[in-house]
Structure formats: structure tokens, C-alpha cells
Amino acid sequence: MEKKYGSKVDAWLLGVLYVVLFACLLPLFYDGALVVGVIAVVLLNVLVTAWLFSYRYIVSDTQLVVKVALFPPKRYDINAIQSIRRTRCPLSAPAASLDRLEIRIGNDTLLVSPLRKREFVDDLCQRSKNKIEVSI
């Protein structure tokens, strides 16, 4: 049975993105295109919000699947997971929060930010045939 976990979304991240989008579209307001500017700001804010809330982590019997909006899903073998630890690493990742988990899979590192961290980690540990080193 597979389980789905949504990503935690930082409110400050939404605020920063909204301010940046508004600032980029500000010239439209000065060129007399007020209606176009308002529509563009609202539309882009809705798209960015939908994109940030689209992050999903799916744990199946053998795989961890990471889905983000329209991008193709990435699949990771749960049995290849070596360790999971808490991090606040700001590197680009399929995570909408800086309250993250670093998952070591072979030579790769995956950064995720599931809402229910403890349940997510427990789920991965139960499904893995190997012992996962956990420090969260």
C-alpha cells in the first residue's frame, strides 16, 4: 500500500515570491496597463502557490517517489537509503520549506520537507530491508 505525504510550505517563502513577482510586474502599473498588471500579478501568484503546494512524496512498498507539479516523477529505491537526518540546507530541492530531511541514497543526497516527518521516516524504515541510520 502506498502512502502520500505533502510538503511543508514556509509562509515566508510564499511572501518573498509574491513580493518578487509583484516587483517584476510593477512597470505594467506605470505604463497605464493597470488591469493587465493586476491580472498578471494575480495569475502568477496563483500559479506559484499551486506549484509550491504540488510537492508530493509517495512511499510505496519498494520506492520513494517524488512528484513536483508537471515534472516527471523521480523514483528512489527504499532499500538503497542509508541514512536520514534533519537539515536546514538551502540548496535547491523538491522541498517548499527549509525544515528538511536529508536522505542519503548511495552517493546521492535527496532533500525533502514532508509535513509529517516522523511518520514519513518511520514508514521508510519499516519498508526498507536494510537498517537506515536515523538522526532527526
Image: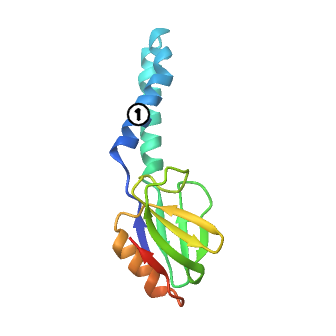
Residue 1 appears in the rendering? no
Give the answer, above or below, for where 104 lies relative to 93.
below
Residue 1 against residue 13 in the figure, above or below: below
Q: Nearer the viewer, residue 35 or 136?
A: 136
Query: Where does the image place residue 73, in percent across and percent down from the top left?
Result: 59, 64
Of 88 and 72, the residue lying toward us: 88
What quarter of the picture does the N terminus occupy? bottom left
Residue 67, percent from left and from top: 53, 62
Q: Name the secondary structure under disc 1.
A: helix
Residue drawn 41% across the image and 29% down it:
19
Residue bearing the label numbered 1: 18
Look at 49% across and 82% down and name the residue there. Answer: 132
Determine whether, in the image, residue 76 is placed left or right of residue 51: right
> Which residue sits at x=63%, y=67%?
108
Residue 20 visible at all: yes
Q: Residue furthest right?
A: 107
The answer to which image quadrant residue 3 occupies is bottom left
Label 1 packing within 10 angstroms: few (<14), some (14-19), many (20+): some
- Give the camera-side residue of 3 and 106: 106
Q: Quadrant of residue 125?
A: bottom left
Q: Residue at x 43, y 26 (%)?
A: 22
Question: According to the image, what is the colour scheme of the structure?
Answer: rainbow
What percent of the width, then of the height, locates residue 96? 44, 52
Image quarter (top left, top right, bottom left or bottom right) of the C terminus: bottom left
Camera-side residue of 14 and 67:
14
- Counting labels gives 1
Image location of residue 83, percent across then percent down: 51, 75
Tell me if 91 is positioned left or right of 7 in this view.
right
Amino acid type, mark 1 = Tyr
Is 57 rendered above or below residue 48? below
